[in-house]
Image (cartoon, grey):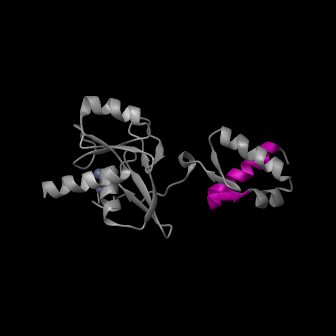
Amino acid sequence: MLAIERRDLILKKLRETGRVQVSELSKTLGVSRMTVHRDLDALADEGFIDKVFGGAVLAVEHRQIPQTGTCAVCGRPINIHTRVVLNTQVGEDIETCCPHCALLLLEARNDIVSGLAVDFIHGKMINIKTATFLVDPDVTVCCTPAVLCFADDKEAKRFQIGFHGELAPLRSAQKLTAKHMDLSS
Ligand SMILES: [Zn+2]
Ligand SMILES: [Zn+2]
């Protein structure tokens, strides 16, 4: 089997299962672990996967995320430019219209283990745990107060200069958004 065929098979398996093990791949592909590592390195260099201990996972940008169509919090239609997908402990995906609703949900529930949001500048899905949030800037995107999500905090700061609002990491952004909602009700 050619390297490119093996890499296609690895990607196919990752799309099905979300995670692959080096030992398992070495058996099913009939090649050495070294070869599997080389294949995984190549796929990681191309940005398709992230290597993790003993194997690999599909890179965030390449994960297939099911779309349900409406926000789990406010019921608005989901806008693909602002949507957030949260994952619960039992592996359920919850979709919200924008970071505003996602933060309110995170504040209300304690069974959310991870989440992906759309970077406001680049439009890529990014990990909410490492993202920077801008709460209540002078822009209208979806819900009020608006909450924007940035992978790069320098870009977030530059955006804040023009549009105001408060910058915060996930936990504080949750609190801030919940506080805004309390004040407005
Ligand atoms: Zn919503
Ligand atoms: Zn919204």
Residue at 17%, 58% in the rendered image: 182
Residue at 40%, 52% in the rendered image: 84
| Observer-nearest of 138 and 12 | 138
Q: Position of residue 121 (x, y in %)?
A: 40, 35
Q: Magenta segment: does it hold 8?
A: yes
Residue at 24%, 35% in the rendered image: 164
Identify the magenta region. 3-21
* Rendered-image quadrant of the C terminus: bottom left
Report the magenta stretch's main SS. Answer: helix
Residue 158 visible to the viewer: yes
Residue at 54%, 45% in the rendered image: 61
Residue 98 visible to the viewer: no
| Observer-nearest of 103 and 173 | 173
The relative height of residue 64 versus residue 162 in the rendered view (above or below) is below
The relative height of residue 177 versus residue 159 in the rendered view (above or below) is below
Q: Position of residue 181 (x, y in %)?
A: 19, 56
Q: Magenta segment: does it hold 108?
A: no
Q: How many numbered badges does the structure rendering display?
A: 0
Residue 7 horizontal side relative to residue 103, left or right:
right
The relative height of residue 184 versus residue 164 in the rendered view (above or below) is below
